[in-house]
Amino acid sequence: MFKKIITIIFLLILIIPIMGIKAQTTESVKHSHYVWRSLMIPGWGEYSLNEQKRGELFVFTESLLWIGMRGSFVGSNVEKNTYKSIAMERGGISSGDKPRQFWIDIGNYDSREEFIAEHLRWRDFDAIEAYQDPEWDWNWASKSDKKYFESKRVRSDRLLLMGKFFIGGIVLNHIVSGIDALYLSRRNSETVIQFSILPGHSLSDGRTYLNLSISF
């Protein structure tokens, strides 16, 4: 999972500067320098541009997202180990090494025989083919045990999904920080035009006039 995040961020580092900066002039290279920093570490480019508050915001957001992602995945694994233990202790499961669909099925049926009987009525022979082997047998001691197991399985899946959303948030935070660094860099490097209007007096004809001065 972490390798996927690093790969996505690396691709962003390569792609976004190219999309946002078309001509590799001296000015655009300077812009891309800040963009790359923020794509690697959100807030770094902002700090380099002396935008402390904006940099702190991205760093804080990044920290929360990583903590949330890590907590979600750890919680999902804890719940997974819990529901597998419940299934082996109270459902007669021989092993915890089963595919995801198996855990969904045993949460919906009291026993393997009940599952097979219902799918035979539906003439869904493909669904019962794998469960012909006694190794896939289960038989819940009580409906409350099955209900408790199912609650743990659903919670594990929800935490796993939440962790994936946090990954999306991390990637988005890198993108937004890179775009923000590009905006700040361009804004800070814009040419400053100053206007000044000064009164004047002509000695030759005695007229008063205004002198317009523009400096870049």
Image: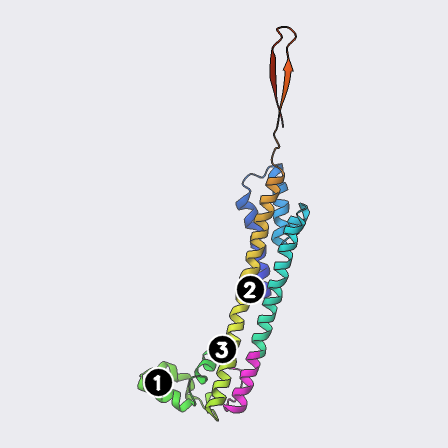
Q: Is residue 83 magenta?
A: yes
Disc 2 to disc 1, how far (Cα)? 38 Å
Residue 210 vertical placement versus 105 (above, below):
above
Q: Quadrant of residue 3?
A: bottom right
Disc 2 to disc 3, how far (Cα)? 18 Å
Q: Secondary structure at mark 3?
A: helix
The N terminus - image quarter: bottom right
Q: Where is residue 138 shown, x and y percent of the image?
A: 46, 90
Q: Are marks 2 and 1 in contact (CB under 8 Å)?
A: no
Mark 2 vs mark 1, foreground winner is 2
Q: Residue at x 57, y 46 (%)?
A: 17
Q: Where is residue 77 shown, x and y percent of the image?
A: 57, 76
Q: Quadrant of residue 74?
A: bottom right
Residue 41 showing in the rendered view: no
Q: Earlier in the sequence, mark 1 or mark 3?
A: 1
Q: Quadrant of residue 41?
A: bottom right
Amino acid type of the residue that numbered disc 2 sits on in the rendered structure? Phe
Q: Is residue 26 magenta?
A: no
Q: Where is residue 62 shown, x and y percent of the image?
A: 62, 59
Residue at mark 2: 166
Residue 38 showing in the rendered view: yes
Residue at mark 1: 119
Q: Which residues are magenta?
A: 79-100
The numbered mark at residue 154 is: 3
* Neighbourhood count class around disc 2 (C-alpha, 10 Å): few under 14, some 14–19, many 20 upward: many
Q: Residue at x 38, y 81 (%)?
A: 127
Amino acid type of the residue that numbered disc 3 sits on in the rendered structure? Val
